[in-house]
Image (cartoon, rainbow, N blue to C red):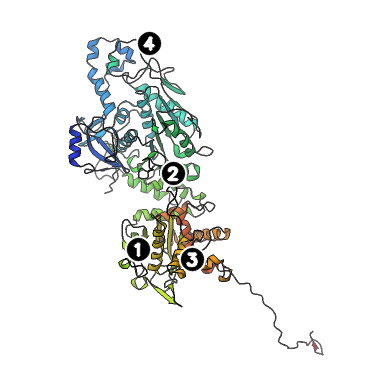
Amino acid sequence: MYSQTLYKILPDHVKPKIFKRMNRYKKWEYGYNEDHNMVVISKNGQIGDIYEIQNLIIALPKAEEIHEFKENRWTPFDYPKELKRIKTVFDWRDYPEEFKEKYYDYIDNEFKRREEGFWYINKDIPTYITGTHYMYLQWSKIDVGQPDFRESNRLFFIFWEACRADYRCYGMSYLKNRRSGFSFMASGECVNMATISTDARFGILSKSGADAKKMFTDKVVPISVNYPFFFKPIQDGMDRPKTELAYRVPASKFTRRSIVSTDKPEDLEGLDTTIDWKNTGDNAYDGEKLKLLVHDESGKWERPNNILNNWRVTKTTLRLGSRIIGKCMMGSTSNALDKGGRNFKKLYDDSNVNKRNANGQTRSGLYSLFIPMEWNYEGYIDSYGYPVFDTPQEKVFGPHGTPIKLGVIEYWNNEVEGLKEDQDGLNEFYRQFPRTTKHAFRDESKESLFNLTKIYQQIDYNEDLKNSLQITKGSFSWENGIKDTKVIFSPNNNGRFLISWVPPIQLQNRTIKKNGRIYPGNEHCGAFGCDPYDISGTVDGRGSNGALSGLTKFSMEDVPPNHFFLEYIARPQTAEIFFEDVLMACIFYGMPILAENNKPRLLYHFKRRGYRSYSMNRPDKKHNKLSITEREIGGIPNSSEDIKQAHAAAIESYIEHFVGIKETGYGDMYFQRTLEDWAQFNINNRTSHDASISSGLALMACNKHRYAPSAKIQIKPVELGIKKYDNKGTTSKIIS
């Protein structure tokens, strides 16, 4: 049985004594709680379960009243027919008091649910939905009528409520699959917030102006029209506007007080709140102040428009100085990387809640959320809103009574299998219906320098294997902590090394001593490539990683040939730790290293420690042609165009022969980060491709004979002092 969860409950996140005391006195405040590093979304001073969703810790309200529907699942409440006929609050005031008395409690309850959220029993489980989610389910009208409850949407809205509550956060960056309902949910939130806000602006952007307009006219406006009179301010202008929805005079934020009031329309204070859309552009909404910005299809902005540039501009519309006054709800599937996907990927990666600056904010200011397609795929959600992962053994029905006969995982695998021969089609399917973030940002095969078909074949194969038996994480250390003795490898979940092969004991720490110098004893078995760094820290703390790759070659030893066996992509606290890590790996495997020498501190470290012989010289030059520095420390420069081309060609050749589907099965290249780096490699901008640099140098080191300079041989005739004769005719003649 396939199982998956989108959240964890943290029962011990808050000490029990503190938890009980704060609840007793209703002391939990809505917003970010610094003492416990969690976001409280409860508005009644009490909390219940504490969720962790995509590394964001969220405290839910304590369950008080829990509603039980007859069918043990979400069911929209009936809207009384008598109230349906009332279109505005002013019509309501014309009704007699005895009529209104019947519905005051009903209206009060709706306001309470909108504000605090709603608890009900779903499939025998107490379930909490936020006020925004309640408004979406109960009062929003979408293309199929009323929305169905989905567990994935419940967690989406809980995450969004946490984004709203957290003063450090500018909103969310949601990576989704097609037909997930984001556009309708965002439209619902837009209307929900606009109808309770005064003097506020709400904006909509999409991949094109036409798309933004369509979202406004087909989603936002119908939801607003469908609101009951007690939630809906009277709008200014047309019932179904094309450019701007304005809640102006005589509109008002309605409360129990206002609907009882006898004030005349002209005496009421207006909201002066608007919702509109803008054409797509880097400077859209520049200079405005927004309460909410809905960013739809943000992963599909193509040149000349740039989602990164736009976000830098629109981010300023959501703050006054350092104070965040508005939020952004951003969601999208991703285009291919060169069609807007790369910029969105950067924005998404920069929204990781685990990576914050000194002000407690992510690099983008947003919080990233990804929900796999199996949680949100139309036709594979049961009547309780949960995904049907496995093909059912018994009858299972969807929300509208349609039987579900196939599990979503099997369906997805069938689609993938059918597209194996069409790599671009497969990549598009992955982007539209991703089960991982890697699927979501798949690139087009025709745009890569290398064979993306083979790379992605290998990536998918590795993911199916889960790398459980192929990869070991760990660390190297000196035996008993004494340097220059014996190096030991220790499996360790916090280690910086990924290892797929360990040499037999007789090959470990193998050295050769010649003329008082120590040489690697397994040079005939393989070599390392390295992309080093020199400086421990950087100004922004974002410096590139150091990268080390280990590769075997064919030999008569008990060694798997042409196998990448080690991957190290990390930036320890100091450069010296990195240098020592690299040195220990070389000594443990007994193999030399070919490193870029434009950042020479690593190679000077090797020389200073007495391991100069482990550092290979560049293979494309004879020893007498090396520079003074190259003779001193070895290594190879990265600036030469010939070296760049040779380096890329080495990777290209390896991928063609040893990656993806081969005649004998799949390749044994198990390092996903390196494979992904190859997929995105740009020969004209190599600085961010640490893994590609190191792996390419390892290939060049193992095949150094291919790059050796060829000697120009000139053949000169040698005079032996022997006369030659022409014997034609009857007389021999000497040939001069």
- What is the quadrant of residue 472 in the picture? bottom left
Position in image of residue 625 (x %, y %)? 58, 68
Amino acid type shown at disc 2:
Lys
Q: Is residue 491 above or below residue 160?
A: below
- The residue tagged 3 is 701
Are there few (<14), some (14-19), or many (20+) residues within 10 Å of tag 1? many
Q: Work out whether mark 1 precedes mark 4 in sequence or the reverse, and give the earlier one.
A: 4
Real-space Cα distance between discs 2 and 1? 34 Å
- The answer to whether the residues at label 1 and label 4 have Cβ atoms under 8 Å apart is no
Determine whether the residue tagged by mark 2 lies in a helix, strand or loop: helix
- What is the quadrant of residue 45 in the picture? top left
Real-space Cα distance between discs 3 and 1? 22 Å
- The residue tagged 2 is 345
Position in image of residue 2 (x %, y %)? 28, 48
Left/right of residue 715 with respect to residue 111 in the rendered view: right
Position in image of residue 196 (x %, y %)? 34, 23
Amino acid type shown at disc 1:
Phe
Determine whether the residue tagged by mark 1 lies in a helix, strand or loop: strand
Residue farthest to the front?
Answer: 608
Between residue 102 and residue 426, name the one nearer to us: 102
- The residue tagged 4 is 266
Real-space Cα distance between discs 4 and 3? 83 Å
Circle 2 or circle 1, nearest the eye? 1
Q: Work out whether mark 3 precedes mark 1 in sequence or the reverse, and give the earlier one.
A: 1
Circle 1 or circle 4, nearest the eye? 1
- The answer to whether the residues at label 3 and label 1 have Cβ atoms under 8 Å apart is no
- The residue tagged 1 is 476
In the picture, which quadrant includes the C terminus? bottom right
Left/right of residue 534 with respect to residue 141 in the rendered view: right
Q: Work out whether mark 3 precedes mark 2 in sequence or the reverse, and give the earlier one.
A: 2
